[in-house]
Image (cartoon, helix red, strand yellow):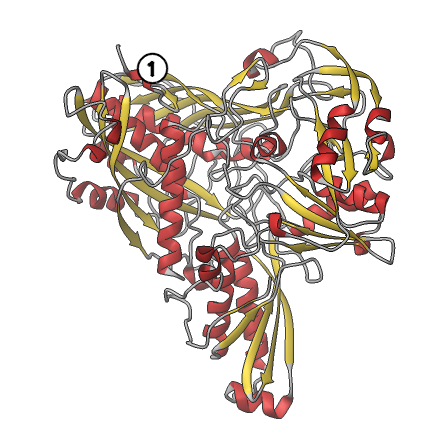
Amino acid sequence: MTQTAGVTRQGVGEGAVRPDAALKVTGEFAFASDLWLDGMVWGVTLRSPHASAWIRSVDVGPALAVPGVLAVLTHEDVPGEKFYGLEHRDQPVLAIDQVRYQGEPVALVAAEHPETARRAAAAIVVDYEMREAVTDPRAAMEPGSPIVQGTGNVLRRQPVRVGDTFTADVVVTGEYAVGMQDQAFLGPESGLAVPAEDGGVDLYIATQWLHVDRDQLAPCLGLPQEKVRLTLAGVGGAFGAREDLSMQVHACLLALRTGRPVKMSYGREESFFGHVHRHPATMRYEHGATRDGRLVYVRAEIVLDGGAYCSSSPAVVGNAASLGVGPYEVPNVDVVAVGVYTNNPPCGAMRGFGAVQACYAYESQMDRLAEACGLDPVEIRVRNAVSQGSKLATGQVIDSPAPLADMLRELAAMPLPAPPEDDLRARPGGVSQTTHGEGVRRGVGYGVGIKNICFSEGFDDYSTARVRAELVNGEPHVTVHTAAAEVGQGLVTIQAQIARTELGVDHVTVATADTTVGSAGSSSASRQSYVTGGAVKAACEAVRARFEGLPAREALDKLGPIEETREFRHRPTYPLDPVTGQGDSHTQLALCVHRAVVDVDVELGLVKVVELAAVQDVGRILNPVALEGQIHGGSAQGLGLALMEEIQMRDGLVLNPSFTDYLIPTILDMPPMRLSILENPDPAAPYGLRGAGEPSTLSSTPAVAAAVRDATGLALSRVPIRPQDIALR
C-alpha cells in the first residue's frame, strides 16, 4: 500500500501523524488477511501432531478424491532445494522422513474453498512411528542424548572470559528460568501468491524481511531470484516472529502447481505452530562483590532452548553472551551461553533477542547482592553502572553517551503513586471482587537493561533507498522507495519526515515496500530508523545536491525529475572470539531503566501493576508520539513475560495455542506510565539517534518481578510468576 503524507510539513523531531492511523482506527486498513484476487484458491497445511516421529508413509489419495481439490503436495513435489533457513538451511519445506516438532508441515492442499482444503488435509493418511522426544535442553547436551539435528544438539556455545579473580567478600548465587514467550501479534500469518506469465511468482506477504524471504524462496522453487517478486502486504504486528518463513514457500508452491492465485491465512491456533517463539532459558549466576557492593566478578551459564531448527539462534546466543552481565563494570567475567536443539517448537527472534533472558537473571542477582551488602537496589546499580568510556565484558568500549547512573537517580526521584484506591478496578482481581484490600501488599522494584542496536558480529548490515523528486501539478513532490517493512512501528512516517526535513518539501509519498529496490534488511534489532533512516537521508542529500542551491520548485522546473539511490551501512562490527568472547561485536548500545509498583494479593497470588516508570536515552527524538508508543509497547510485553505470557509445554506438545489460554496484557493490565526520555546524541548515528524499539522490553520484566518479590518476600526465580508461585506459601 502506497502511503502519502499530508501537506503540512512535519519533519524530524515532530509528532507527525501516521498516514495509516485513521484507516486502522476505522477498520479500513487492508491487512494481509484481507488480500483477495478473482479466481484465487485456498491453501492449507497439514501439520504433525507429534513432537518427534519417523514418517513411514504419506497417502494423499483420500485428499485428492475430495471434490474441489486442485493439488496435494508433499516433499516429493518441491522442485528445488528441500531446505531453507535464516542462518542455516536446516528446515525442510515439507517433512521428508521425520518430524522434529509438533506442528511441522507435512503436506499442502489447494482447493476452491478453504473448508474444502481443510477437509482434504484432514483426509491425508500419515503413518508415523513415534520416538522419544528430546525436550530438556540441559539433558540434550549430555552424551548419549538422542540427536535432534546433524551431529549434535549444541548449535552454538559462546564464552565470554576476562580476568582471573573469582573470589570476593560477598558472593550470591542463583538459578533462574524464563518461559517460552510468544510474539502474540494480532494479525496471523497471511499471504497471496500469484503465478506470473514468465513462469515466476508474485507474492504479497506480511513479513519483516522481503529480500531474505526471496533468497530462501527462490532456491526451493527452483527459480532465479528475479522471477520471485515480493511485495509487502499489511502487517498486523511482528516482534520477530515474521523474520522466518511461515507460509511463503507453501503458497508459492501451490500457486505454481495450480496456475491459480493461492491465498493462505492461518487461524490463531495454527499461528502458534507457524512461527518461532522467544527462547526459554535456564540460567545459573554467581556474583562476587566487595563489602561495599563493588562488583569483582560474575560467573554465568545461560542455556537457551532453540527448539527443532536453527532459525536465528546463533545470533541470540551471541547477544546473551555479550550482554550477559548487563550494563555494569565487571573486571572478571566467566560467562558461557549455549543454544541447544530440542524437539520443542523452533525459537528465534523476538523483541529483545537474547538480551531479555539474561537481563532477568543478572538484575535478579543485583537485587540479591544489594540485600547481601545492605544497600538500596538503586544504589548498588549506581555504584557499578557503566558510562561512556567503560568496557563491556567483551572488551568493547562504550564510545557514546551512557549516563546510566544519572538515569537511575532520576528514576528513583520520581514520585511514587498514591496508596491503593477503594475502586475495585484498582485492586488485584479487579471487578471480580476477589479482595477489598485484605491480603494486599505493595511492592516496588527496579530493572536495568542494555540492548545492542542493529545487527552485530560482522553482519553486512545495510539498507537501500531510492528517492525521486519531481513536479506534480506544479508542486514539488517526493517519492521514497525502500524495501523496509512497516510492521506497525511507524517507519513509513519516519521516512517521510526525513524527506521533508532534507528536501524542504511538503508532499511526500512512501512507496510500497517490495523487492524491486535494493534490500533494507529486517525490521528487527531496533535498526530501521538507524539504517533505513540513514539510507533515506543519504539519498535525499544526493537529490538536494543536484538542486544547484535552488529551492526545490525552481530546481525541478529547471532540471526535471531527479532520482538518486543510496546504500547506508553502519560502522563495521566483528565476530566474538570463539574462545574468549572478546571483540567489538556491536555498533550501538541502548539503555533503559524501569521502576515497577505492584499490589499483590498474597492469599490468591493475584498481581496488579499499579505503575511503570521508565527513563530511556534515545539519542535524538525523531517522532515523540511514535517513540512513546514504542516504550509503552515494549514495557507491556515485558510485563506480560513477568506475569502471564508463556507457551505451556508437556513432552514437546503445546497445551495452550489460543488467546483464551495464552494470556497477554490488555488495557486493564497495563498501568499508567511515567516516562523521561533523554537525548544524548550518538555521533556515529544519523541525526544522533539511538534505536528505541527494544530496550524497554528488557528492563520492565525484572522490575515487575522485583516488585512482586518486595511485596511477598518470596525468592521467585522464574518468570512468568504465576498465582500458585505466590499464594498459600
Q: Which residue is pictured at 13% across the width and 33% down the height? A: 422
Quarter containing the C terminus? top left
Q: What residue sits right under mark 1 in the picture?
A: 724
Whether residue 298 is situated above or below residue 17 in the rendered picture? above
Q: Which amino acid type corresponds to the residue marked 1 in the rendered image?
A: Gln
Residue 612 image position (x, y, % from top left): 27, 40
Can the viewer see residue 380 in this picture? no
Q: In terms of secondary structure, where does tag 1 sit?
A: helix
Q: Which residue is pictured at 87% across the width and 39% down the height? A: 79
Residue 355 image position (x, y, % from top left): 46, 35
Q: In terms of depth relative to the viewer, which is nearer, 676 or 589? A: 676
Q: In terms of depth relative to the viewer, which is nearer, 255 or 155? A: 255
Whether residue 208 is situated above or below residue 498 in the rendered picture? above
Q: Which residue is pictured at 43% across the width and 64% down the height? A: 687
**Of all residues shown, which one is farthest toward the front?**
67
Q: Which residue is pictured at 73% across the width and 29% down the height? A: 119
Q: In terms of depth relative to the viewer, which is nearer, 95 or 388? A: 95
How many numbered dots are placed on residues in this image?
1
